[in-house]
Image (cartoon, helix red, strand yellow):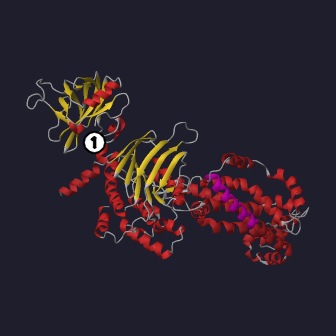
Amino acid sequence: MSTIDATTAVKKATPVGQRREPGLASRIVARTSSGVVQVVLLVVALFWLMPTVGLLVASLRTTTDANASGWWEALTEPAQLTWSNYDELLSNEAITDSLWNTALITVPTTLLVVVVAALAAYAFAWVEFPGRDWVFLLVVGLLVVPIQVGLVPVSRLFGDLGIFGSITGVVLFHTAFGLPFAIFLLRNFFAEIPRELLEAARLDGAGELRLFATVVLPLGGPAVASLGIFQFLWVWNDMLVALVFADSESKPITVALQDQVRQFSSNTDVLAPGAFLSMIIPLLVFFAFQRQFVSGVMAGAVK
Amino acid sequence: MDQTISPLLGSSGTFLPVKGPLTMATVTFDQATRVYPGSERPAVDKLELDIADGEFLVLVGPSGCGKSTSLRMLAGLEDVNEGAIRIGERDVTHLPPKDRDIAMVFQNYALYPHMTVADNMGFALKIAGVPKATIRQKVEDAAKILDLTEYLGRKPKALSGGQRQRVAMGRAIVREPQVFLMDEPLSNLDAKLRVSTRTQIASLQRRLGITTVYVTHDQVEALTMGDRVAVLKGGLLQQVDSPRNMYDRPANVFVAGFIGSPAMNLVEVPIVDGGVKFGNSVVPVNRDAIAEAANKGDTTVTVGIRPEHFDLVNGETKSLSKDDKAGLAVTVNVVEELGADGYVYGTAHVGGQDKDLVVRVNGREVPMKGETLHVVPRAGETHVFSTSTGERLTD
């Protein structure tokens, strides 16, 4: 009996500061508030996805259906959906060639930007050389130069060099204008690496290149991956540069699709699947690199 | 941590990754000077230091004294503006770090976070192009010494602070370098682990026989670990000596106050005939010392007395003087009881001003706060320094 008495006494004597069961009202508030947030997020996400879903559905309908009704009609009549547009698209050489051109422009540009920027960023962050900070300031200054300023002078330059209207020209232009931001981003990330790690590697006998490859690059992985994805997206989606510097042989998908837009109508059967295809590829790239976005790569390095 | 020492002792030689350095790895700082850009005063000023082969030398001093800079100059991580640094017969003054054949343990360990413990430890050998099997063997040997065998496959973030510290040590010993450099390797450990690791590092170093330069701000670490201790202050070398001599014969007021805990009492007292006046007593000090001070025109000297070198005189039983109030009256402010000993922190009126003194007393007979003690410095245990220069006067 005495023990029971003791426990009940303890229960009664619960101090004010101790955790108590939350009241019904506060529980309801807690539930609904997180629920409301989730619902709102869902609605926003659906709203943003609407055009993409519309594009996907439209790309799966025939021209006749598309001209007859809006894409949402297909949701109630799934029988309308067909792969025929995609079949035609993939047998359309103008489109497949331009898709190939896009890849030929995007992949080398991304690689060039990432490699050159990573090396430059390492130098700006960790190699002592005279005037280093001034040169870096210059690079940062280049961030504010709009791409349009370069179009005419670079066109002339490329004309003189004989690479106007070639994939090489487009790649070089993209690389040049991508580098300032890329260097800026990576340099700031690399500078966060603890100095002692690099010193330890130097004492372990590593030269600059090995230091870069075995310590800086692995630790800078997340930043390099982000940069790679952004650069890929920007170049993939670019139209302005390609419109100016590419000719009919070297034009990428963005320009090729724009060719399908007519003054008073559009070739929906080509545009919709083409646009969707050009959109889904960068997404796949993103998901492929996604696992590189890991936090805490630096954990355990110091202390 | 203690058990990691025993396998080491039980199998001396078996696990030794080093058969003994092939060359004499002495280290010489020859007037080495480092001036940081934009700074007038050198961070390290004409450092002159000879470290013998296999010696454990500790650089100690307050923060900003240049001890870490000296170490980094030896590592090649810091430029040497003047003078030279030699390892053995080799002038390494302007060699890049990777060509110096030295290994360093950093204060924050600087482990490669993306590599496993084994890869961390074998990184230097991998760069040197050592065959994989040899690397594995050496890493495993070192891991056995440091009790890290079961952690070889882990990443640093999955280790405790003490384990990381050992990995950093392991990375250094796998290298079999000519010189070990350690930059406050224990300061990130908790107090208990620090004491046990201290012993471990010291015994490991004796075992390996590799010349070691160790930087710390903790004078206890310096005294307990080093064969010799070098005290720096403001970029200037104050004294290099064995821990015993450092304690018994500090070269100047700074070293006297820095080495020892609680610190030595330093009191400025007037010179009188036959010694210096200490309260009501005249404490005899070396005649030459007094003469030397007088020659400099000083009327006072700075007397240093360690807390354990005060004798209590109460005037009733074993008074040293005819006067009951012999010695110096110390009013007790605080008593620290450490069990075996007690330390009395008190105030005394010496040389015309109130002065804080620390006196060690018997742990069983500690005075109460507010009481007055009468103390006399023990003859022969006083240190006399010039008030004007701070240099030691007595022998």
Question: In the drawing, does residue B12 fall left or right of residue B180?
Answer: left
Question: In the drawing, does residue A198 fall left or right of residue B17?
Answer: right
Q: Amino acid at mark 1?
A: Asp
Give the percent coordinates (x, y) of residue B50.
42, 50
Quadrant where the image shows the C terminus of chain B: top left
The chain carrying label 1 is: B
Q: Residue furthest top?
A: B352
Q: Residue furthest left?
A: B317
Q: Which residue is tagged 1?
A: B248
Residue drawn at the location 35% of the way across and 25% of the way down: B296
Q: Nearer the viewer, residue B131 or B158?
A: B131
Give the percent coordinates (x, y) of residue A68.
84, 69
Give the percent coordinates (x, y) of residue A263.
91, 61
Q: Nearer the viewer, residue B38 or A140?
A: B38
Quadrant where the image shows the N terminus of chain B: bottom left
Q: Main secondary structure of the magenta part?
A: helix
Above or below for B142 versus B36:
below
Residue A58 showing in the rendered view = no
Q: Please tell me whether residue A111 belongs to the stretch shown in magenta.
A: yes
Give the percent coordinates (x, y) of residue A94.
86, 73
The magenta span reads: A106-125
Residue drawn at the location 27% of the way across and 30% of the way down: B288
Q: Nearer the viewer, residue A163 or B390?
A: B390
Q: Please tell me whether residue B274 belongs to the stretch shown in magenta.
A: no
Question: In the drawing, does residue A251 fall left or right of residue B93?
Answer: right
Q: What kind of element bears circle 1?
A: helix
